[in-house]
Amino acid sequence: MPSSNQQRKEFDSMGFVSLSADSYHGISTHRYAEKFFLSGQHIEELFIRSMAQAKKSALIVNEQSGLLDSGKSKAILKSCDEIIDGKFNESFILNPFSTPEAFNTNMNEVIANRAIEIKKKNKGDYSIVSPNNDVNLNQSSLFMFQAAAKLTSLHILPSLLSNLSSLEKKLSKFSDENLLLCFHSIQRTSSMVKKAAEEMKKISFSSIGNANHDSASHSSHPVFRENFVKQLRKETRVNLRLTPESNFQKLSSVLMLLAADVISTAKHLKLKTKYDKEAAEACMMSCYHVIGNHQTVVHATEQSSSSIAESLVYRNVLHSLETMENAVKVMNTLF
């Protein structure tokens, strides 16, 4: 393997770019990183894993359809499995305020360059394995990004629901009228979270705001989407299904309601001397952030013709989901 101070050159329509010879991302990711440097944050590891699972499923479908030769498929499959196992996370250099196309490109290049390396060739030689023609075959960026976002949410939701169940049981034992009202409100919202979790099992072939957006590029193979969802169901053991539309924003609305419930509960617990006021206050602050996230989702949905807006919706909902999982977990420690 080349040492880290060696360079390789890659070329696109804008010219040459020098990259580290060790780099698994390529020139297109480099261009996106120069363009989208807004937040200083990076893509979450759980999302990277989910996207790699989606890519692996797409690879298997394309191979079974006779569209990829077995030599390339084996290398790409191994590359996907390694990313699923948590390797190469540092190669995903884009921040969350990028487009689905940008992150899809980053994933394609990392998979391709690792596959090239597996075939004992030099990274950047895309005649061996192409990020676009091989790794991304038959795929739409939005479709794959959505599938990864749904999978990520389904990794987090069971823990949230389990912690909500524990919180409900603890609140149900209070005789305090205000806390009993909180219990009934959280109980109602919890049932809404369960319904939203079922919605996450729907993989849609429309965008968030417009059923026709990007429809031409969702796949070139007539049965790719159906076979892809079947394979992804097998890969993840989640009962996923393909639908014309699904409502990812609805989860944001439900999480906002849950945040309001947790704020109300924390406020009442703060009035009782035996509970940790600072922990209750921290839960409240995190829930205010979730409410702000929902307002961003509402405004971004109105701009859904933009793929950046679509990316922002998915990112904010996933961030709110993770925040509420932790907030409810902390609430349980107050008792």
Image (tube, helix red, strand yellow):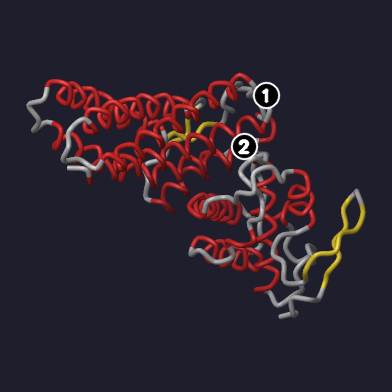
Which element type, helix, strand or loop, lies under badge 1?
loop
Contact, mark 2 vs mark 1 (Cβ under 8 Å): no
Marks 2/1: CA distance? Answer: 12 Å
Which is in the foreground here, disc 2 or disc 1?
Answer: 1
Left or right, residue 286 beside residue 61: left
**Compared with residue 104, is residue 185 higher up or lower down, i.e. above or below?**
above
Q: Position of residue 296 (x, y in %)?
A: 55, 26
Q: Nearer the viewer, residue 175 or 85?
A: 175
Query: Mark 1 highlights which residue?
Result: 305
Between discs 2 and 1, the one toward the N terminus: 2
Determine the residue positioned at 70% across, 77% down: 120
For residue 142, the mark is: 2
Tell me if mark 1 has few (under 14), some (14-19) or many (20+) residues whose alpha carbon lies within 10 angstroms of its own: some
Residue under the image location 66 percent in, 62 percent down: 69
Residue pictured at 78% horizontal, 49% vertical: 34
User: In the rendered image, which quarter contains the C terminus?
Assistant: top left
Residue nearest the viewer, comparing 155 with 283 = 283
Residue 18, percent across and down? 85, 64
Taking depth in this image into account, of 170 and 217 the one nearest to the observer is: 170
Residue at 68 percent across and 74 percent down: it is 119
Give the mark count: 2
